[in-house]
Amino acid sequence: MSSVKVAVRVRPFNSREIQLLSKCVIDMSDKETYITSSSNQTYSFEFDFSYSSFDKEAVDYASQEKVYTDIGVEMLDHAFDGYNVCIFAYGQTGSGKSYTMMGKVNDLEEMGMIPRLCRDLLVELVKTERISNSTIL
C-alpha cells in the first residue's frame, strides 16, 4: 500500500447543466483522465483511480459499490492491521463529494463510503468478538 492514493470521479450533469445543453469535456480510461478544453486541446492526467459516474448506462460506470470496493475495503484492512487511515473528499461545491462520501444512507446501492466503512467495521468487530469470545465495548 502506498502512503497516499488519489482518486477522481466525474459526476453526472445536474438539472441546470442539462437545461443548458452542456457538453461533457472529460473522458476516463483506467487510470487516465482526459480533459478537452474549449479550444479542443486535450490534456491527460494519471491518478491511482479514475471513476466515471457520468452515465449509469455506460460500461465503465463507477457505482458507489465499485468506489468502495477499490478504496474503502483496502483502507479498512489496513486499519485492522493497526495502521492509521484517513479519507477525505476535496472539490468545488456541487462536485459530488457528499454523495461519494455519504450517498443515500438508507439505500444499499446508493450508500456512500462512510456508511459502508462503518457497516463493515462493525461486521468485522462482531466476527472478532465471536471468534475470541470477548466483548467489544
Image: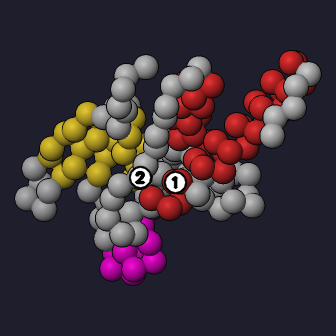
Residue pictured at 31% horizontal, 46% vertical: 27
Q: Distance from label 2 to label 1 (Cα)?
A: 8 Å
Residue pictured at 36% horizontal, 26% vertical: 3
Q: Residues within 10 Å of mark 2 (few under 14, many from 20)?
A: few
In the rendered image, is residue 59 in sight? Answer: no
Q: Quadrant of the C terminus?
A: top right
Residue 93: image x %, image y %? 36, 69
Q: Residues within 10 Å of mark 1 (few under 14, many from 20)?
A: many
Q: Is residue 106 above or below residue 72?
A: below
Instruction: Indicate which label's residue lies in the foreground, 2 or 1.
Output: 2
Q: Secondary structure at mark 2?
A: loop
Q: Which residue is mark 1?
A: 100
Q: Is residue 83 above or below residue 15?
A: above
- Which residue occupies the foreground of this view, 117 or 136? 136
Q: Which residue is mark 2?
A: 89
Q: Is residue 85 left or right of residue 122?
A: left
Q: Secondary structure at mark 1?
A: helix
Amino acid type indicated by mark 2: Ala
Q: Quadrant of residue 105?
A: bottom right
Q: Which segment did they paint magenta? A: 12-21
Q: Quadrant of the N terminus?
A: top left
Amino acid type indicated by mark 1: Thr
Residue pictured at 35% horizontal, 55% vertical: 90
Q: Quadrant of residue 34?
A: top left
